[in-house]
Amino acid sequence: MRLACAEINLTALNHNLARVKELAPGSRIMAVLKANAYGHGLVTIAQNLVDADAFAVARIDEALALRAGGVIKPIVLLEGVFRAEDLAIAATSNFNVVVHDEAQLVMLENAQLASPITAWLKLDTGMHRLGIEPNQCHDMYTRLERCVSVAENIKLMTHFACADDLDDGKTTEQMALFFDSIKGRNNELCLANSAGIVGWPNSHCDWVRPGLMLYGVSPMIDSTGQDHQLTAVMRLTSSIIAIRDVKAGETVGYGSAWRAASDTRIGVVAMGYGDGYPRHAPNGTPVMIQGKRFTIVGRVSMDMITVELGYDDSVALGDEVELWGPNLPVEQIAQFATTIPYELLCNITPRVEYKYIQE
Ligand SMILES: *Cc1c(COP(=O)(O)O)cnc(C)c1O
């Protein structure tokens, strides 16, 4: 029997990429692969996203791993680089850099690179994380343009703070500020993350930056991927490794945090926080066995969870258990564990076996 396993459906991945194209037909696609492609496997995901126009990662090591894996498409470093040595590496490896503050601009001004590098000037329109002040745009742009180390096709970008909520006016404000700040320029523009792609068509412009939706997960609050015609890519499974009888009044697991109300049966599943399953998943968090929903009882431990089987004796030792996937949206598990699907996906640990399938 197979223990903790992340089955990655590459057909679903490409279906989701096609869905991005359908939603943003006029835009090029920069597929976001940071954090091990949201836990799906960096290089394999890149190799299978044949129709993406570029890739984006957060760290230079992620970009280098893609090149080492034979990936030749443009790669954008979403945080840019922080050291002059990395700028040199970025130039020789043909990475694009985001420029989000003056220190990075100065680094480019002082650099002597093997070949000019493509720069994405990032404006902070309200996220207040990375980006230059919109009123610095003209000045910084002019300085970038003068850099011999910067390629001619400077691109402009920003990032949304609240695009997952259609009722939040902030996205409209961010777009207005962005378009106002870059008025008169005809550079390539990039604003939309997955939530922008799904919820804010006016933000699509020349490039879109989908992450989460590529993996089949809804980027919007209060919906699942299915609601947006996306298909779950990851199916996290393991097996029942023991079945126990417990008597009414007995407790299960660390801290005796759950007590059986009546005589019942407990299935022990080889899946715990050591695999990336959220330790905070409470009693009542669902799992699927044999197409039926059961719920976790007791605390999640490092290597195991315990599931109440009750009087259902159709479940047997060795049965496969789905923790999330096509039959159990990761969005729902995230809600039970009071976190977000992003965190669950990228927390999968190296102990979990990966299995790539085509449908
Ligand atoms: C992670 C990230 C994205 C992708 O966001 P999703 O919500 O996963 O689509 C896009 N742009 C930037 C700057 C990011 O950091």
Image (cartoon, rainbow, N blue to C red):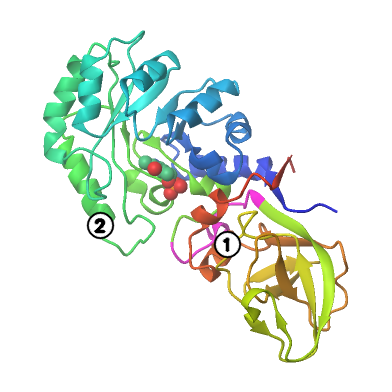
* SS of the residue under disc 1: loop
At a point 34% along the width and 28% down the height, the residue shown is 81
Residue, far front: 255
- Where is residue 189? Give x, y as percent: 30, 33
At a point 38% along the width and 24% down the height, the residue shown is 96
Q: Quadrant of the N terminus?
A: bottom right
Label 1 neighbourhood size at 10 Å, few (<14), some (14-19), many (20+)?
many
The answer to whether any part of residue 186 appears in the image is: no
Instruction: Point out the quarter of the image occupied by ligand 1.
Output: top left
Q: Which residues are magenta?
A: 221-234
* Mark pair 2, 1: CA separation: 31 Å
Q: Which residue is mark 1?
A: 278
In depth, the one of 23 and 136 nearer the eye is 136
Q: Earlier in the sequence, mark 2 or mark 1?
A: 2
Q: Amino acid at mark 1?
A: Pro
Q: Which residue is mark 2?
A: 170
Magenta segment: does it hold 60?
Answer: no
Count of labels in the image: 2
Viewed as shown, does residue 142 lie left or right of 116?
Answer: left
Where 303 sits versus 14, above or below?
Answer: below
At a point 21% along the width and 29% down the height, the residue shown is 103
In depth, the one of 127 and 221 nearer the eye is 127
